[in-house]
Amino acid sequence: MDLLKDTVLADRQIFVEEVVGELLTRKGLTICTAESCTGGLIGHLLTQVAGSSAYFKGSLVAYHNQIKISELNVLEELIVSCGAVSKEVVCAMAINAKKKFCTDFSVATSGIAGPGGGTDEKPVGLVHLAVAHKTGVEHKKCLFGDKNRSDIKTASALTALKMLQDTISSF
Amino acid sequence: MDLLKDTVLADRQIFVEEVVGELLTRKGLTICTAESCTGGLIGHLLTQVAGSSAYFKGSLVAYHNQIKISELNVLEELIVSCGAVSKEVVCAMAINAKKKFCTDFSVATSGIAGPGGGTDEKPVGLVHLAVAHKTGVEHKKCLFGDKNRSDIKTASALTALKMLQDTISSF
C-alpha cells in the first residue's frame, strides 16, 4: 500500500489519475471502467483531469447484480457460485468492459463498502480489483476493514488507479 | 440556483443525495444515471449513502460520443444535427438509460467542463441536464461559466440531484 502511505486520502500530494492520464496520452491508448463498490468514483477521478476525453471512453457502473449480468455479460452462474465480490467476477467485469467499450485497458471493482452486507467469510472492507490489458488481466484482493464506507470507496479507487498506472507502465 | 446558495460546494450542509435516497426508499422506487460531463460523480454521490444498493442500480458514463451511440442508443444523426451538448441528446440519454436499466427514474448530464472545447455558441460551463420519469422527461439548461472544471462537474451533479429530488417528490 505504498500509494496510500504517500497520499493522504483527504489531501493527496500525488494525483495518480494525472499520472495515468499522462501515460495514456503519451502512448495513445484508451481506458474504461467497470465499477461496483466505487459507484463511479474512478470515472469521476479520471475526468477531473483536463483533456481526459482523449483517452477515457466511459464507465459501466454495475451496482446491482442484474446490471453486471445484463450490461457486462457476467454469467449468472459465476455470481451464484463465487459471489459478486470475488476474483472471478471482478476479472470478468474488467475483461468484458474492455471488449464492450473497445479500449486498450479497463479497471474493475467489486467490494463490500458497508456498513451492512458483511459476513465472516466476506467482511466489510473486502474489495477485489482487476485491470484488463491486451494479454490478460491483473487481480488484487484488498482488506480495508479499518475504514468507513466513504474511505473504503476512496481507497479502492486509488488502489485501482495505482494498479492501472503500474500495468500501463509495463507496456 | 437555491441549491448552490444553500450548499457551499466544498462543505455542504445539505446532502441532496441523502434526501433523494430517503425519498426513493420510502416510495420503493429505483434510479440509474447516464453521465457525460460529470464522469461518474452522480453515481459516486448516490453510493456514498449507506443502503443505496436498494434503489441505485447503476450508471452508464458515456464520455465518448461513440459510447452514447453504442451503449445508450442515442441516434448518431441526433448528435450530428444538435451536438452532444444539447437538450435533445441529454433527454435521449435519460430516456434510454431508464429503459436499459429498468428503473423508475434516471438522470443524465451533458456539458462542457473545460478548460478546452468551448465555442461562442456553446461555451465552457454550458451543461444540459435531464430527469426521465414514468410520464416523460424534465430538462434544464445551466451556465456555470464562472467556475473551473472541477466545480462545473460538482455544480452539474448537485443541480441534477436537486432536479431528481423535485421530480421524485412530485410523484
Image (cartoon, coloured by chain):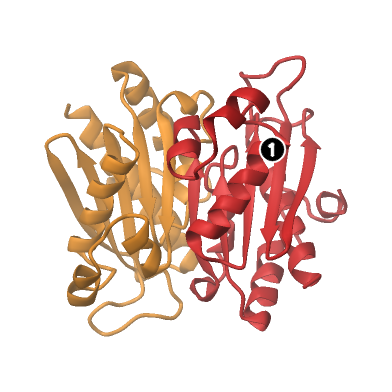
Chain colours: A red, B orange
Q: Which quarter of the figure is the C terminus of chain B placed in?
A: top left
- Is residue A82 rendered to the left or right of residue B169? right
Answer with left or right where residue B75 lies relative to residue A21: left
Residue at 68% over, 19% down? A118
**What residue is rendered at 44% in x and 81% in y?**
B116
Q: Position of residue A71 (x, y in %)?
A: 44, 44
The answer to whether B5 is drawn above or below residue B165 in the figure is below
Vertical position of residue A77 compared to residue A7: above or below: above
Q: Chain of mark 1?
A: A
Whether residue A99 is situated above or below residue B76 in the rendered picture = above
What x and y, as percent, mark residue A34? 56, 49
What is the residue that sits farthest to the left in this orientation?
A: B135
Which residue appears at 49% of the width and 57% of the height?
A100
- In front here: A26 or A8? A26
Q: Is residue B95 visible?
A: yes
* Left or right, residue A117 beside residue A99: right
Total numbered labels placed on residues in the image: 1
Secondary structure beneath label 1:
helix
Q: In x, y percent, where is residue A121?
A: 77, 18
Quadrant of the rendered structure where residue A154 is?
top right
A56 in relation to B2, above or below: below
Q: Is residue B8 visible?
A: no
Residue A30: horizontal and vertical position, in percent? 58, 70
* Residue A106 as seen in the image, left or right of residue B110: right
Instruction: Name the amino acid type tagged 1.
Output: Glu
Q: Residue furthest top?
A: A120
Name the residue tied to disc 1: A88
